[in-house]
Image (spheres, rainbow, N blue to C red):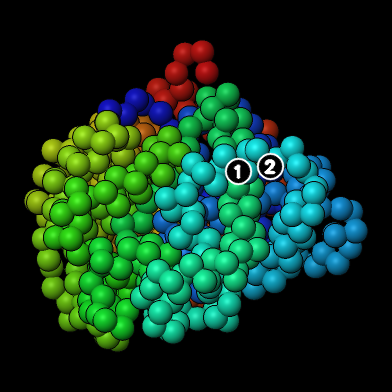
Amino acid sequence: MTLQRSSGVLLHPTSLPGPYGIGELGAQARQFVDWLAQAGQRYWQVMPLGPTGYGDSPYQAFSAFAGNPYLIDLETLRAEGLLQDSDFAATPDFDPARVAFGMQYVWRNQMLDRAYAAFAFGGAQDLRDDFDAFRAGEADWLDDYALFMALKDAHGGLPWNAWEPGTRDRDPEVLAAARARLAGAVERVQFVQFLFFRQWNAVRAYAKERGVQVIGDIPIFVAMDSSDAWANRDQFYFDDQGQPTVVAGVPPDYFSETGQLWGNPLYDWDAMRENGYAWWVERFRGSLKLYDIIRIDHFRGFAAYWEIPFPAETAVNGRWVPAPGHEMFQAVRSALGTLPIIAEDLGVITPDVEQLRDDCGFPGMAVLQFAFGGGDFSVNDFLPHNLRENQVVYTGTHDNDTTRGWWVSADESERHNFRLYTSSDPTEQTFTAQLMRMAFESRAGLAVVPLQDVLNLGTEARMNLPGTTGDHNWTWRYDPAALLPSLATSLRALTESTGRLQRGE
């Protein structure tokens, strides 16, 4: 994929404003798209859109194919007659600045229960044909996911490998009985997915009409407690009891002295090779229904991945294991054609990772917050003058502090290197704008900045601190009053002056 000179903003939909405690795919999403278009931005980058579980991380979803029910716009459901005014009578007093996922789990699921009940008892029957078509078209993943979620609820939320053996091991007779017994719960899950995809597709169409495309994530691994692992157990390293024998993570790095123990099950690449990497073909096919461009998180795992014996307390005692990235991507290309992919090639990057990225023609990434560390920082690959055209440059990502917060807490050596490189001495107030300009002025084809940096916010607006499960992770929401027209005007001016605004935009 070749990048045209352009720019975009990173914002997960959960961070959108709105009255019901979390961002939704309704009016506020469209208003954000309008603002992006006014600001001359061609891309809206989001994190994975899957249904989240414990810890609320979008990178640990119950399905690699499903959408997050929390994002469903309730006002749209009211307009469609699936919810009534009386259903909103007990709406909690939500914090507009933070997502309370626990409250969403209880209250929003109750609202979606009411919406499904209204539909099941004859409401909004103009949706019936579309719903039936959706179920048929997405059956390859939806049937397993819906049954998985219904069974999970019936088991009090326990992970699938704690279910009784017949259900855990997918005995055909046991599953047939479960489908009959839980038919209503299964259809409820399917209907909620229909609502999500219907609304997300409407937002994407709205964005496309305004010249805005969506960049979205594929996490390289799936969650241990997911329908993907349960329904495709032979594609992973599991024992006879459904316990993983090895799990994923990364060795000690910039973020953690003991590495990061993610705990995801690891792929059995030999088994995947036997069926032509069919699971990956379908995963990319599903992601292309959600996004215009796919960012592969932890791309280096397709060259070699960090394998940690299970169980483990940290990620220290692991080993690098080669992965068949070339072969897998070729299989996907043969099935789907050219892939619009950005490779997240951060972290411990070795020549084999660079070779895989370049052989596939995928743009890599650079983060300017990483550009000024180290002794001889002049050789740092992330310095603006070292960037490549076929690359995406970020001030920071969802795993970094905000740029303002980073400057406040940066080592004095990093501050010194920045001053030396730029012949400037920025203040806390001016640093973010300066780093944004450096990103936009660089020769990298695409420049992306988190909305927190556009708003010049501090550490209080950080999205995630890797390796932690803090209460503030994934919860930040922006104040709609901060998204001023004047801010769009200044961002558009920066975009135009650095050659990232195309004629006619």
In the shown orientation, is residue 275 left or right of residue 368?
Answer: left
Residue ID for mark 2:
128
Residue ID for mark 1:
132
In the shown orientation, is residue 297 left or right of residue 403?
Answer: left
Residue drawn at x 55%, y 47% is 135
**Is 356 located above or below residue 170 in the figure?**
above
Q: Amino acid at mark 1?
A: Asp
Q: Does the image show residue 453?
A: no
Residue drawn at x 17%, y 40% is 330
Label count reads 2
Residue drawn at x 16%, y 53% is 273
Q: Does the image show residue 280?
A: yes
Asked if marks 2 and 1 touch (Cβ < 8 Å), the reply is yes
Residues at marks 2 and 1, CA–CA distance in whole angstroms: 6 Å
Nearer the observer, 106 or 440? 106
Nearer the observer, 296 or 185? 185
